[in-house]
Image (tube, grey):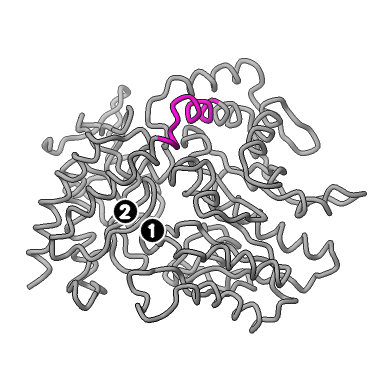
């Protein structure tokens, strides 16, 4: 890669220096940056690639953060935003409406399965989850079941950083520093089939949800929130029949089922909504990220007619909202983004190419450190292990040395952006833009193989 040199804007600003002094980056160890360990500054993007301020090109193997599904640099989306700026720059949807919010809500309702017809706009994923939790509690209260307030989520699952969403999140290290959290969330095992005992029926993972509901008391449980494919921990795919059993359990105990599709919707798994991939009908869908392919912030909570009904009667109101929810510019971009999905059949492309993508990753299984390859669509992970036979994981100092001491920096220096993560057992995650094809898969492979082979030599004695 290029030698280290100051990054400057046209105005002569030293971006490195100013970033270290003023930009508090999210989920970042700010003390780790200095003149020798510079902040990556990404300046432009096109297709499946981005470039930094030194002119180096990177394959965006994470789609920004699971969200630039239509690819970078789409002029159609910029043009849609410009047209909307000229027509109506902003108006709130608190007791008012505007054409783009109406059109987008109608479009989303036409695409969702079943009776998911009521669209509540947010600005992002955590806000969508927060809204769903509040709606579930309020729904039961309006029906005379005010005790039904508890939320059941899964261990290691990530649902967002606002206080309610964080309470549903099942990652101890993210939760502990902000305690006490919003009360009422309980956690059950996730669907990590790589580490699930082979002599046990996988459907017991769904039954654990019912056991938790019965333990807490069905009269106290409002909702179950699950990702179709769980992100944190590394792309946990549900076993056959899992979501069908969960649906039965929720119906049996008058508990709402929230499908958290902030990552999994919008073609990531080959369907507009991932619940369709696994053939289950939720009561609420939360979505964001790729709704606009991340060109502008936007999210949505989409509720069934049944759940919305109490709020559409008499003087009732869902007393919740965000100033910028349903922003005209965001709605216009989302409509143009969906038009790209439909015109280019991005969902069909993912379904046609997902086996090739997975086979590329599985071809690395001969490397000693590669323990498991799992996922669906263009959303996969490689779990890294010390010993394939025992599935012994890296933890503590070893995980730190492997992920942050070597893999993250080395993959980036070779031109690949992906996620080396230890929220759970160590994994590398991949979620390329949905326009990616054989050329990009081969490029990922050609970077991964030598890096993982070297990691094996370093970490496995």
User: What span is colored magenta in the figure?
Assistant: 336-348
Task: Find disc 1 in the rendering and name its residue.
Answer: 235
Horizontal side of 127 relative to 307 (left or right) equals left
Q: Position of residue 165 (x, y in %)?
A: 57, 60
Q: Where 342 falls versus 209 (above or below)?
A: above
**Quadrant in which residue 243 is drawn:** bottom right
Q: Position of residue 51 (x, y in %)?
A: 26, 32
The quadrant of the image that shows the C terminus is bottom left
Nearer-N-terminus badge (1/2): 1
Under tag 2, what secondary structure?
strand
Task: Find disc 2 in the rendering and name its residue.
Answer: 429
Is residue 112 in sight in this rendering?
Answer: yes
Say which of 261 and 273 sits in front: 273
Predominant secondary structure in magenta? helix
Residue 69 magenta-drawn?
A: no
Residue at the location (25% across, 51% down)?
33
Under tag 1, what secondary structure?
loop
Is residue 176 in sight in this rendering?
Answer: no
Badge 2 density bin: few <14, some 14–19, many ≥20, Cα 10 Å: many
Question: Mark 1 and 2 residues: CB-CB less than 8 Å, in contact?
Answer: yes
Q: Position of residue 195 (x, y in %)?
A: 34, 74
Residue at the location (67% across, 40% down)?
323
Badge 1 density bin: few <14, some 14–19, many ≥20, Cα 10 Å: many
Residue at the location (22% across, 54% down)?
362
**Quadrant in which residue 74 is drawn:** top left
Residue at the location (51% across, 45% down)?
265
Say which of 65 and 192 sits in front: 192
Say which of 56 and 432 sits in front: 432
Say which of 327 and 435 sits in front: 435
Horizontal side of 268 relative to 412 (left or right) equals right
The quadrant of the image that shows the N terminus is top left
- In front of the other: label 1 or label 2? 1
């Amino acid at each position: 890669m290029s030698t280290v040199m100051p990054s400057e804007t046209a105005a002569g600003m030293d971006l490195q220096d100013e970033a270290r002094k003023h930009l508090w980056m999210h989920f970042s160890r700010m003390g780790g940056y200095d003149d020798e360990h510079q902040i990556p500054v990404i300046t432009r993007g096109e297709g499946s690639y981005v470039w930094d301020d030194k002119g180096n090109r990177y394959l965006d193997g994470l789609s920004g953060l699971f969200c630039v599904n239509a690819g970078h640099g789409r002029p159609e989306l910029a043009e849609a935003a410009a047209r909307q700026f000229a027509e109506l720059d902003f108006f709130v949807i608190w007791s008012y409406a505007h054409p783009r919010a109406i059109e987008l809500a109608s479009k989303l309702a036409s695409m969702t399965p079943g009776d998911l017809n009521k669209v509540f706009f947010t600005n992002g994923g955590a806000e969508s989850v927060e809204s769903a939790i509040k709606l579930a509690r309020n729904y039961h209260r309006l029906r005379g079941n005010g005790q039904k307030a508890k939320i059941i989520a899964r261990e290691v699952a990530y649902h967002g950083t606002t206080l309610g969403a964080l309470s549903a999140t099942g990652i101890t290290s993210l939760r502990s520093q902000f305690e006490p959290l919003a009360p009422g969330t309980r956690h059950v095992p996730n669907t990590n089939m790589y580490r699930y005992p082979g002599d046990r029926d996988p459907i017991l993972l769904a039954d654990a949800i019912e056991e938790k509901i019965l333990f807490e008391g069905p009269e106290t449980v409002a909702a179950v929130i699950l990702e179709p494919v769980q992100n944190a921990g590394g792309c946990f795919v549900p076993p056959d029949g899992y979501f069908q059993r969960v649906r039965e359990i929720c119906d049996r105990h008058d508990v709402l089922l929230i499908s958290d599709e902030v990552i999994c919707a919008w073609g990531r798994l080959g369907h507009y909504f991932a619940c369709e991939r696994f053939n289950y009908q939720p009561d609420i869908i939360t979505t964001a990220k790729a709704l606009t392919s991340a060109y502008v912030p936007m999210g949505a909570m989409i509720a069934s007619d049944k759940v919305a009904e109490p709020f559409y009667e008499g003087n009732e109101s869902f007393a919740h909202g965000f100033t910028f929810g349903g922003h005209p510019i965001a709605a216009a971009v989302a409509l143009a983004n969906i038009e790209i999905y439909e015109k280019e059949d991005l969902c069909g492309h993912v379904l046609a190419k997902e086996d090739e993508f997975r086979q590329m990753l599985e071809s690395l299984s001969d490397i000693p450190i590669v323990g498991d390859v799992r996922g669906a669509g263009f959303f996969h992970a490689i779990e890294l292990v010390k010993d394939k036979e025992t599935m012994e994981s890296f933890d503590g100092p070893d995980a730190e040395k492997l992920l942050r001491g070597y893999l993250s920096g080395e993959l980036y220096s070779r031109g690949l952006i992906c996620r080396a993560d230890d929220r759970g057992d160590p994994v590398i995650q991949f979620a390329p833009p949905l326009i990616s094809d054989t050329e990009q898969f081969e490029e990922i492979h050609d970077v991964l193989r030598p890096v993982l082979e070297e990691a094996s030599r370093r970490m496995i004695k």
